[in-house]
Amino acid sequence: MTNRFVQKMSGMVDLTARDVAALEVVTSRPRRYAARKDLIREGDETGPMLVVLEGWLCRYKILPNGSRQIMAFMMPGDACDLHIKLLAAMDHSIQAVAPSLVATVSRTEMQSMMDEHPNIARAMYTAQLVDEGIMRAWIVSMGRRSSAERVAHLICELYLRARNIGLTHDGDFSLPMSQVILADALGMTPVHINRVLKELRLAGAMALKRGSVTIIDPVKLVQIAGFDDNYLHRRLHQTD
Amino acid sequence: MTNRFVQKMSGMVDLTARDVAALEVVTSRPRRYAARKDLIREGDETGPMLVVLEGWLCRYKILPNGSRQIMAFMMPGDACDLHIKLLAAMDHSIQAVAPSLVATVSRTEMQSMMDEHPNIARAMYTAQLVDEGIMRAWIVSMGRRSSAERVAHLICELYLRARNIGLTHDGDFSLPMSQVILADALGMTPVHINRVLKELRLAGAMALKRGSVTIIDPVKLVQIAGFDDNYLHRRLHQTD
DNA sequence: CGAAGGGTTGATCAATTTCAATCGCGGTGG
DNA sequence: CCACCGCGATTGAAATTGATCAACCCTTCG
């Protein structure tokens, strides 16, 4: 079984065999979580860094009025909260969207790995910058895109991220995401998501079935979304 | 003149006199920028780290249809793009909202300062985590808050951030922000912002005049916003 | 079999945008 | 000095988007 963390990191920088071995050691004791299981809740003390090996997680927050907003999806290979121990308490929760396999890496483990493996440190910082770019793109989507554009844009993002780690097959990829989750991520109601999905399906752009997404016409989808992949930074700076 | 960068950093960790001196050296050659001046544009090569000493900056992006979305405000003491050099090109622009004084710190300067001053490194990482928390809060606002809540929430955030660095006087603080800027930040139209501001003014919560904000009734404003300041992480983890 | 979670649809309601017009102020050229 | 210009603020009316309310269906699962 491929280690997606290694795969993602090595897509960003050149890793030596020793680097790869270190990454493998540090993710060698993962734990399984069922879908809908919270890994950490708002208000909890900050803990170790999480590395997703299989499945999907999300960051989310529940508002006083009961509505939920998802702020990020984490897919295999993604790590979260590199320096999180510097803060006292979590300001949001993290939940498994699908059944997931997640390794935890303590701060000291992480620190010593990054001290000994500058390539890994560089890759981690790069990954964090890309994640920030993704957050900014979400802000742009929520602020200035229509509902259909938002849905299309998110699917484009998730598709490219999935493709980077080899989770896609032609236009298809497995995305165990309900319409409710999509609504919580995009700040819309499930009812409206449903109508938008219908519209995108009828337009021949994409279709979401239980557990998987099919991109019918990539060009059309990208065009609807106004998607420009430069914020995912597939091209990075060469070594200093 | 107080160095706001030093002030902000020392609010996060205990700094020695040597740490403070290093921060002062590194920000000793700032440059002035007029309001509306772009410091860096989308597509540009990534450059040095920026440190705001006076004024206000924003990160923004223009969409193909011409609309603009602001993704963050930077105020005195804020630094941006710690590891930015790892990426090839900027995925957004940075502009001065008001006349500003900004220092640039090259990556090597930054690196050696952080190597020699672990306190500073810790403070930088903490600041970055807080900035990420702010971005997540924006996503929540845009997704799940009504327009009045959004405006109130942003003002609460900016007020607290301004207060942290001593820029407030009672309920007042200087905020050279037009209604158009507010609209671009909150994903609304200027017309609607205008109506919401009127509503908040009539409700006796806050008032925005050319160049400054008055918080008339803090309790009411916080309550309208559903504001909870824990995401700004005023309380941090004690040293390891 | 019954309940729960997801998905789908129609009708109506509310929030926000769009369009259009007006006002005031500060700066500038004549 | 003053008319004029441009930007920002303000307001009303109409149009549009998306939310809400209310059913109903289907599949899965205990």
Image (cartoon, coloured by chain):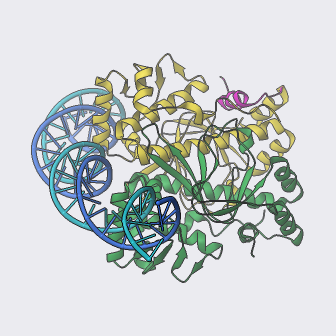
Chain colours: A yellow, B green, C blue, D cyan
* A148 to B166, vertically: above or below: above
Q: Main secondary structure of the magenta part?
A: helix
Residue drawn at the location 42% of the way across and 35% of the way down: A177
**Left or right: B192 as drawn, with respect to A74:** left
Residue B35: x and y, percent?
Answer: 59, 59
Residue C14: x and y, percent?
Answer: 22, 58
The reply to whether residue A46 is in sight is no
The quadrant the N terminus of chain A occupies is: top right
Residue B201: x and y, percent?
Answer: 36, 75
How many dots with numbers? 0
**Left or right: B221 as drawn, with respect to B236:** left
The quadrant the C terminus of chain A occupies is: top right
* B122 to A157, vertically: above or below: below
The reply to whether residue B208 is in sight is yes
* D12 to A4, vertically: above or below: below
Q: Quadrant of residue B9?
A: bottom right
Magenta residues, start to end: A2-16
Magenta-drawn stretch contains A10: yes
